[in-house]
Image (spheres, rainbow, N blue to C red):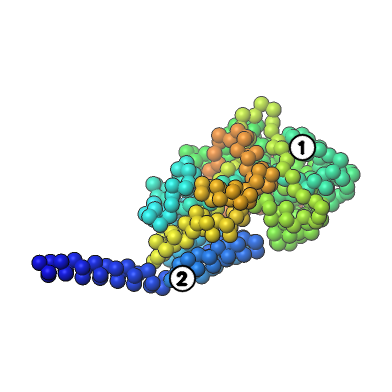
Amino acid sequence: MKKTVLRPLVALSLLVLTQTSFAEEQVDLRMSWWGGNGRHQVTLKAIEEFQKQYPNIKVKSEYTGWDGHLSRLTTQIAGGTEPDVMQTNWNWLPIFSKNGDGFYDLNKASQYLDLSQFDPKELQTTTVNSKLNGIPISVTARVFYFNDVTWKNAGVEYPKNWDELLAAGKTFKEKLGEKYYPVVLEHQDTFALIRSYMIQKYNVDIIDEKQKKFGYTEAQWLDFFQMYQKLVESHVMPSSKYYASFGKSNMYEMKPWIAGEWAGTYMWNSTINKYADNLKPPAKLELGQYPMLEGATDSGLFFKPAQMFSIGKSSKHPQEAAMLINFLLNGKEGVEALKLERGVPLSKGAVSQLRASSVIQDHDPAVSGLNLALSLPHSINASPYFDDPQIVVLFLDAIQSIDYGKKTVQEVASDFQRQGDRILKRAMR
C-alpha cells in the first residue's frame, strides 16, 4: 500500500520540479518594430516592465525608422532569422503569408494570449486560411487635420467638399504667399485621397481581386491622374518635386510643417499626434470635415489595422512570444506604457483602462479622427494589394513623371494601368 501511495507522490514531485525548471529557464526573445523616437521610448519602457514580471525572459529590441525596415525584414524571413515578435503591416500578408503559413498561427497561443479582448470581425481581417497571422493593435483611417493658426491667417474656413478644398489653395497663395499650402501629402497619402475621390464619383474600387487587375477603365485612370494634377496646379498641396527638395526626413520633422507653411495633412488618425506635437506654438491641429461629392454613397475611406503584432514562424519560443504580445496589448503595465502610441487600442480591456485614466478622450485628435471616420459611409473595403509596395512605388514614379515634365497625364495614366495590371497579376498568382 505504501508503495502505491509513494509512486504518485514521487511523480508529482518530479512534475513540480520540471515546471519550476521550465519557469526558471532562460528564454531569449527578439522583437522588432519601426517608428519614431516616441514609439521607441514607450515600447522600450513596456518591454522593461515585461522583463520585471518575467525575469527569465530577456527581450532584445530591434527598432528602426520606416525606411529600410521592410527590406530588412524580408531578408530575415527569407533566411528564417526573423524576430520572435514583429510589428507588421496588414498589407504584408499577401507578401509573406499568401496561404496563411508565413507567420505563427496565434490561435495556437490562445492559452497565453487573451483573444477574447478583440472583436472577432477585427481578427478576421488578419486571418488567412483560418490562421491568425497577427493581432491588430488598432484600426485607422486617413482624415484631414488642419493647422488652426495658418488657416485663420488665410481667412479660410476648413473645406467641406472638394470644390472648397481646391479653392483654398488659390486663396493661400494669394494671401500668404507661394510657400503656403492648405495641406501636404506624401505619395501614399495622395494615392489614398484620390482613391477616395474616385470611389465617391464612380462607386468602384481601384483593385478588382476577382479579376486580379485594376478595376478602372482607361478613362477613369485619366480622371484619376487629372485630379492629382488639379490638386497641384490649384496650389492645394506641394508637388512631389517640391516635396522631394526637403530631403528624406519625416514630414513632421520638416521646417515647412513645423512653421505652418504646410497647413494641414491627410493622415492616419493613429499617428496624427506626432504631427501635432511638432507644430510651432501656439498652433495646434484641428480635425476637419471629410470632403464628399454630392450624391456619393461611400466616402472611399481606407480603413485598415494600424499595425499588427505577429510571431515569426521560425520562433523557437512562440509561447513566451505570445506572453509578450499579451502583456503589451492586454497587460496593465504594457497598456499604461504604450498608451495611444499605436492608435486607439482594439483590446476591450485596454480601452477601459485608458478611458478610466483619461488617456482616451474624445477631443484627442487621434480619437476624434477615428470617431469621424467611423461615422462616414465606408462599405467598400480596400484590398491589401492597394498597399502593395510595388504599386505604391509605381504611383510615386507616375506623379514624379508628371511633376518633372517627363510624361503627359495621358501617358502616365496609360502606363500606370498597364504596369499595375502586370504587378497585380504576379502578386495574386
Distance (Cα) linking label 1 and label 2: 54 Å
Helix, strand, or loop for circle 1? loop
Q: Nearer the viewer, residue 423 or 168?
A: 168
**Residue occupying image coordinates x 39% and y 53%:** 110
Mark 2 lies on residue? 55
- Left or right of 111 on screen, residue 287: right
- If you read the primary sequence from the N terminus, does the residue marked by circle 1 or circle 2 appear first? 2
- Return the residue found at the far top: 295
Give the quarter of the figure containing the N terminus: bottom left
**Residue occupying image coordinates x 58% and y 43%:** 303
- Return the residue found at the far front: 2
Mark 1 lies on residue? 159
Q: Quadrant of residue 214?
A: top right
- Return the residue found at the far left: 1
Percent position of residue 192, x then y: 64, 44
Q: Nearer the viewer, residue 199 or 327?
A: 327
Marks 1 and 2: which is nearer the front? 2
Q: Is residue 406 above or below residue 53?
A: above
Dot 2: few (<14), some (14–19), or many (≥20) neighbours within 10 Å? some
Is residue 263 visible in the rendered image? The answer is: yes
Percent position of residue 356, x then y: 59, 48
Tally of marks: 2
- Left or right of 119 on screen, residue 142: right
Q: Quadrant of residue 335?
A: bottom right
Q: Is residue 17 above or below residue 340?
A: below
Q: Is residue 311 above or below residue 292?
A: below
Percent position of residue 270, x then y: 62, 50
Q: Amino acid at mark 1?
A: Pro
- Left or right of 15 on screen, residue 108: right
**Residue occupying image coordinates x 60% and y 62%:** 42
Q: Nearer the viewer, residue 417 or 256?
A: 256
Q: Amino acid at mark 2?
A: Pro
